[in-house]
Image (cartoon, rainbow, N blue to C red):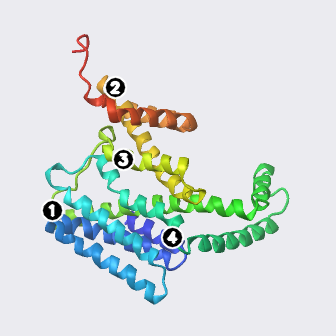
Amino acid sequence: MLLALFLGFGALGTPWPWAALWVVVPVAVAASILLAWRFGRAALVLPALLVLAAVGTMFAGWSPWLVAWPAIASVVGVWMGLREEGGGPSLGERAWMHVPLLLLAAALPLAPGFPAAVTRLDGQMRIEQEKLLASVKPGEVPGSIRSMMDESARLPVEQRQRRLLMVIPNVMFLGVVMLVVSGRALAARIAAMLGWPTLSRAPLASWRLPDAALVPLVVGIAVVAFADRAWHPSALTLLVHVVLGYSVQGVAVVESTLLARGLSPAFVALTMLFVIAVSLLWVLPVVAVVGLSDVWLDYRRLEPSRGEA
């Protein structure tokens, strides 16, 4: 019920037709997981039908990107469903399964018509911002917030639109990943109702991205270094989320090390949350370096020293 309420409120707060994603994506993911778990690769028929629907929207005057998200999310669901047998994937492997969505998000800034859509969105945001500034009387909000609002309103149009080009793909990716997670939770509930085995779970300490995750990282760095500035929003999308993935891997390495020393899991979790909350800006780069080095060192499989054996 809480999941249904969450998705319903999200749909109510989103303009149509994008509000449909709050329902379509979780349902498509849940159906894809269960079909792939039961029928194997034959479940790829579902994302294929959604791809055809995306093509059909072009003739109906809708944006094909609207249906592209459920189609690619359905591919992710099939991938997850195919790996359920034999214990299921680890948490890091499951995170890597979202890479088709990451590639779609990175392709958004290069899509025809996307810059024009960003221009229209910026115009609407500027109008709403001016209305908000006009309605707020002096003293109703702190001066620092008021100055930030005024400064944002005075930004050049080109700078505002460039920020949106970089922000929108990242927000879309994170939003659809959240809907995929909701779809997996829905699939777990349906599987329990059908009497199927429980969907696989994995602890955070087992998080380890596959070595293939280095590919989007290297591609993003190469694009920033050598490609035209028009490609930079796409490269930023790749870099941000790959670095976040390795940051989580660094946290997993630290957590597994502390647990191996006999500390309580609850104490470890609270300590990690506290450290990240009070020092987020410098902790994330540090754990990202730890997570990236884990690709080569694999800390959790190192042999203990003779003194510790």
Q: Which mark lies nearer to you, 3 or 2?
A: 3
Q: Is residue 267 above or below residue 62?
A: above
Residue at disc 2, secondary structure: loop
Kindly identify which residue carries mark 1.
196
Residue at disc 3, secondary structure: helix
Q: Identify the image quadrant of residue 28.
A: bottom left
- Disc 4 marks which amino acid? Ala
Q: Identify the image quadrant of residue 164.
A: bottom right
Q: Residue 111's mark?
A: 4
**Mark 3 crowd level (few <14, some 14–19, many ≥20, 10 Å Cα):** some
Residue at disc 4, secondary structure: loop
Q: Is residue 258 above or below residue 206?
A: above
- Disc 1 marks which amino acid? Trp
Kindly identify which residue carries mark 3.
213
Q: Earlier in the sequence, mark 3 or mark 2?
A: 3
In which quadrant is the N terminus drawn?
bottom left
**Mark 1 crowd level (few <14, some 14–19, many ≥20, 10 Å Cα):** few
- Disc 2 marks which amino acid? Leu
The residue sitting at the top extreme is 307
Residue 130 visible: yes
Q: Is residue 216 left or right of residue 50?
A: right
The answer to whether the residue labelled 1 contacts the one labelled 4, judged by CB atoms less than 8 Å apart, is no
Q: CA distance from mark 1 to mark 3?
A: 32 Å
Kindly identify which residue carries mark 2.
263
Q: Position of residue 91 (x, y in %)?
A: 30, 47
Q: CA distance from mark 2 to mark 4?
A: 50 Å
- Disc 3 marks which amino acid? Ala
Residue 186 visible: no
Q: Earlier in the sequence, mark 1 or mark 2?
A: 1
